[in-house]
């Protein structure tokens, strides 16, 4: 790692780099259950859908995108609107540099500021590195969905990890939109 790591809101110009990072995981293992890598245009569309409501962040390192993170609604039903599902991917070759943790910390901070109460991370098991990351950030295992997805010739379990962002006032204030800094 040469220069400093910079976390910022994603832009449409980042879609190609994000698509390339994600394609690696789609094609090389069961970490994601998607089986065909989405195009850069599709990733830009997804980003556009997410950004008005939830954070979508990238980690810049040495002039390139070293990872990305975003949150989406956990479920569509209204009573779930204070809960989000978080996703973090680090570029191949950029692991074990603190990039995933930095992205996750920034994502969690933004979600807390927006008024969300619960963050869910889903981990295809086994994945000791991801489990360690989630637990280091305060997530606890809320359960395991056994043999829930079939990919690359095998059935895979998914661990559901939950982080309480603190406080559950009654009634809760509505979550606020994501407003990127700068």
Image: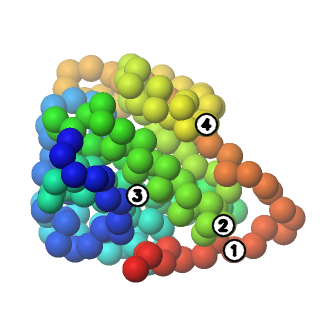
Image quarter hosting the C terminus: bottom left
- Residue that carries the numbered disc 2 in the rendered image: 115
- Residue that carries the numbered disc 4 in the rendered image: 138
Image quarter hosting the N terminus: top left
Query: Rounded to the nearest whole Å, what is the CA distance between mark 1 and mark 4?
Result: 24 Å
Task: Answer with the quarter of the image where residue 18 lies.
Answer: bottom left
Number of disc labels: 4
Q: Above or below — where is 91 with respect to 130?
A: below
Query: Rounded to the nearest whole Å, what is the CA distance between mark 3 and mark 1?
Result: 19 Å
| Residue for point 42% across, 42% down | 101
* Nearer-N-terminus badge (1/4): 4
Query: Rounded to the nearest whole Å, what is the CA distance between mark 4 and mark 2?
Result: 18 Å
Q: Secondary structure at mark 4?
A: loop
Query: Rounded to the nearest whole Å, what is the CA distance between mark 3 and mark 2?
Result: 16 Å
- Residue that carries the numbered disc 3 in the rendered image: 70
- The reply to whether callout 2 and callout 1 are in contact (CB within 8 Å) is yes
Q: Position of residue 25 (x, y in %)?
A: 21, 39
- Residue that carries the numbered disc 1 in the rendered image: 174
Left or right: residue 119 versus residue 5 is right
Left or right: residue 125 versus residue 77 is left
Judge by depth and name the residue closer to the eye, 55 or 156.
55
């Amino acid at each position: 790692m040469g220069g400093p790591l910079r976390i910022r809101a994603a832009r449409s110009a980042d879609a190609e780099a994000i698509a390339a990072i994600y394609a690696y995981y789609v094609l090389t293992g069961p970490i994601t259950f998607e089986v065909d890598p989405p195009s850069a245009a599709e990733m830009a569309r997804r980003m556009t859908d997410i950004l008005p409501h939830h954070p979508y962040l990238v980690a810049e390192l040495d002039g390139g995108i070293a990872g990305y993170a975003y949150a989406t609604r956990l479920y569509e039903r209204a009573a779930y609107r204070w809960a989000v599902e978080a996703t973090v991917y680090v570029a191949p070759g950029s692991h074990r540099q603190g990039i995933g943790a930095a992205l996750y910390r920034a994502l969690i901070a933004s979600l807390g500021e927006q008024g969300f109460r619960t963050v869910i991370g889903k981990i295809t098991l086994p994945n000791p590195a991801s489990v360690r990351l989630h637990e280091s950030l305060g997530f606890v295992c809320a359960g395991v969905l056994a043999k829930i997805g079939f990919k690359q010739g095998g059935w895979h379990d998914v661990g559901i990890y939950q982080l309480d962002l603190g406080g559950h006032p009654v009634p809760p204030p509505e979550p606020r939109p994501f407003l990127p800094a700068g």
